[in-house]
Amino acid sequence: MSFLEHNLKTVPTGFRKILHLNWPIVLLLMAICTVGFIMLYSVAGGSLRPWADPQIKRFALGMSLMLIIAMVPIWFWRNMAGVAYLGSLLLLVMVELFGAVGMGAQRWIDLGFMRLQPSELTKVTLVMILAAYYDWLGVGKVSRPIWVIIPLLLILIPTALVLRQPDLGTAILLVTGGGIIMFLAGVSWYYFGAVIAIATGIVAAVFRTRGTEWQFLKDYQYRRIDTFLDPSSDPLGAGYHITQSKIALGSGGFSGRGFMQGTQSRLNFLPEKHTDFIFTTLAEEFGFIGAFSLLTLYLLVLVFCAASAFSNKDRFASLLTLGVAATFFLFFAVNMSMVMGLAPVVGVPLPLVSYGGSAMLVLLVAFGLVQSAHVHRPR
Amino acid sequence: MRRSAKDTDSSAKGITRRGLVLGGIQLAFAGVLAARMRYLGIEQASEFRLLAEENRINIHLLPPARGLIFDREGRPIAGNEPNYRVVIRREDARDLDQVMNRLQPLIGLDEDNMERIRRELRRAGPSVPVTIADRLSWEDLSKVAVNTPSLPGVTPDVGLSRHYPLDKDFAHVVGYVGPVSDYDLSRIEDQDPLLQIPKFQIGKSGAEAKLEAQLRGSAGTTRVEVNAGGRIMRELSREEGRPGDNIQLTVDAALQNYVQARLEGGLSAAAVVMDTETGDILAAGSAPTFDPNKFVRGISVADYAALTENPYRPLAGKAVQGLYPPGSTFKMVTALAALEEGIITPDDTVRCLGHVEVSGRRFHCWKRAGHGTMDLYGSLQQSCDVYYYDIAQRVGIEKISEMARRLGFGYKFDLPMSAVAEGLAPTKEWKLARRGEDWLIGDTLNASIGQGFVLASPLQLSVMTARLATGREIIPRLVKSINGVEQNIRGGESLNINENNLRQIRRAMYGVSNTRRGTAYRSRIVEDEYRMSGKTGTSQVSNRVVRNSEVPWVQRDHALFVGFAPFDDPKISVSVVVEHGGGGSAAAAPVARDIILQALYGGEPPLSAYPSSEQPRIEQIRRGLQVRDPEDFELGRTRA
């Protein structure tokens, strides 16, 4: 029994819970999704089909799910963390066995009414299990090696399964997101320092040995890195996406070309214009102002999440809230970096804006948990 | 495990501390993102905009060549011809007004055109080409080409435009294409980027519209690098589109040409010729007709008004759209229903006194004096109405309608032509549901001679004739092959009608056009191999007793004829409807006979196929016909 359950008397009950939702977050999420609808409408050449209309329907479904989850006490969700985590692992294995092959990678299971991407689901269940783990573990034990290895395994098992698909973007998100929760839970700085030092060492080794007999990577892998560092060297190959999206951002200027005036969206410059690269259209049509506003909306979500987490005395609740916020941050940070040429192209969508059902539903479910934590916080 | 309040407090503090550190890192990263946005969008904007305008990769759509349409012999019916035009892209023309003003005197654009172009430019996307002028002469195109350095964004271009070498002949079958309109865009759920190209041609009617999916093909793209002036510097890559499928129709262009020419003699008429073996539609004529090429080029208001205001409705494809009371051509249906039900035998007789009285109403035979004693053979041969009034009362409307549907009435055949009509084989339920009235015995009497509620298209009449001639379920077919892949022939199963009964009907139909008392005896074929069986029909449009010549055109009777030949080994079936043409034997039967002979001979038949008394008339008709030279069909082939 944790601290929380001693302080139930003041937790709101019944429909009064709705009044205690974290309304700023709800409104911010709606605003971000609306930006998504507008952009999907624009990239379809001014049409609700084929993207905006299904996206709006999924948004309605996701919002309902979020409210339902928010109404259920947070301790129920904590008790479900283990089941949810094992369930998502099972789905990942199933996708390995029966999953349909889409976009060259085995990623989803066809449920008939929708295509489920278990890797998306894992992003939430991993946050849940880690938060529950550190809630259970005594604060004094978090940095002992044996208690560090367990969460590492919890992170690396789904990561390995996701990498097999192969889905590099999700794998990065899982590892980083999991690491962040370990960091928040108070795992000693030394561990993180060591990891960073080793990673730096490997990168250095990779580059220093290039051209020698013991080079770490194959030649073509080095060439890919080169292309990333200087996209203009291969304007029609690997650098094509990056060059085109940079040009789009650049031609947007300060205030953009205007709604529905982007050339990228109209002429299929980018094959992923409605998913991972939707930010380019936003930047092209609404310019720096539009792009910066979206970034601000995202940051405001983080601020309200942090405020909710810091004021919450329950360890599970605050770790969960911060974990969801961190995952959300990773989503848009990786996507924007990739589109603006700061990071290599890995498949990560712009959260709540890119077209895609699983990602949107899972994020709204995650925010449902955040809301539940907020509603049922000890007072 | 129980936790003390102190323990939770220190935990919450720890999380908050680490959370603030993390928040700091996140904020810093967000700062980097914002800085990058600023760098790309503002500081470097001029450079990127220069990059975008000066030496940029553009994607241009390559419209596919529309699929060609051929007749069954491979003669072209619809092809594509080169179209010299000048297009402009807004994003490449820096100063639109200046460019337009320079262009105006070069190719002589009037103010209306200038206004239209400006309007289209405002609406189209920045990189979508807008047509300034098309169907230019080579000289005009050259003038623009020479001046391109001072006309940024303007490109001389060769596109393809639809051309119908046989102009009027297939206006109703193949239809025509036209530039895609806003209405089309709002109606079609189609994401094809091709439709965004202004003036892109899509099928508007007939097979061109119904087979649009096959004919259009898909767009290719080319990536080109263009300079500041919009000039194409080099092509980086090219992905060819897929041209539309070529479609071969079952029609015979030479026969269609003859049918169309022969029908033009009447004011408003339609005919359908079918192969009784396969159901192939060999010709489907509708007169008067129009030139579909006018629609492709954009028809003038005056020309269009002339077409819509013409009382003979040239725009309607009457062969499949027109619905007429079938009149006496329906009598085979009534007779066959009675025979199949065992209600009559071919030898049973009815006395025709010129009329019968049923429930207080008098129903007349067309021959007021009466036909005397009639059996099945005589009743069809001389088209006695009273005989059918009598047997219809005993068979009942339900059985008659059921037989009508078995023979192809009241069914919308699946053909790629515009507005294929369903027609009507009425039943008691239909009348109650649609009119809210009970079926009267008089309705049955009217229906028995193809009047009243019964309605059929010339196509359905031809199908009925083919089914009677073969006893099999013949289903009309218009598409012979797509890209060389032969299309299935559907139907062909037995109709399960007693062959003896069918034989009685066919014998009587032979009598109609080969015996002295037959209503179409004057239109007989005397060449033994090709003798024709048939049935005349004269369907009343208005209830009256005066002669046709004494009433206005629209009140005159429709003249109909259905027939098949050769009588003993049917190869083709034909139906002819001459709207308000008077009597079927005088106005429709000769047309049907000429079409049958033309089809069986595969060209102009010798005069010896006609009875000697008719030969002078035939020669006179031939002189008046405007039939295409056989070489004309081949001309199109070389061009296409």
Image (spheres, coloured by chain):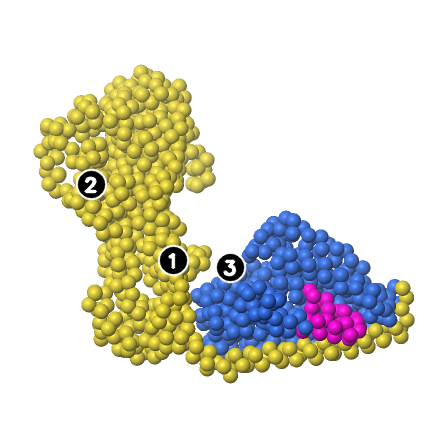
Point 24% across, 20% down: residue: B372
Residue beneath disc 2: B258
Is residue B196 visible in the rendered image? The answer is no
Q: Quadrant of residue A195?
A: bottom right
Q: Secondary structure at mark 1?
A: loop
Point 30% across, 47% down: residue: B69
Crowdedness of circle 1 by 10 Å Cα count: few (<14), some, many (20+)? some
Say which of marks 3 and 2 sits in front: 3
Q: Chain of mark 3?
A: A
Label 1 – label 2 distance at C-alpha: 41 Å
Mark number displayed over residue B240 = 1
Mark number displayed over residue A50 = 3
Outermost residue to the left: B616
Residue segment shown in magenta: A174-200
Q: Chain of mark 1?
A: B
Asked whether the residues under the numbered discs 1 and 2 touch, taking CB atoms below 8 Å apart as contact, a structural biologist would say: no
Mark number displayed over residue A237 = none
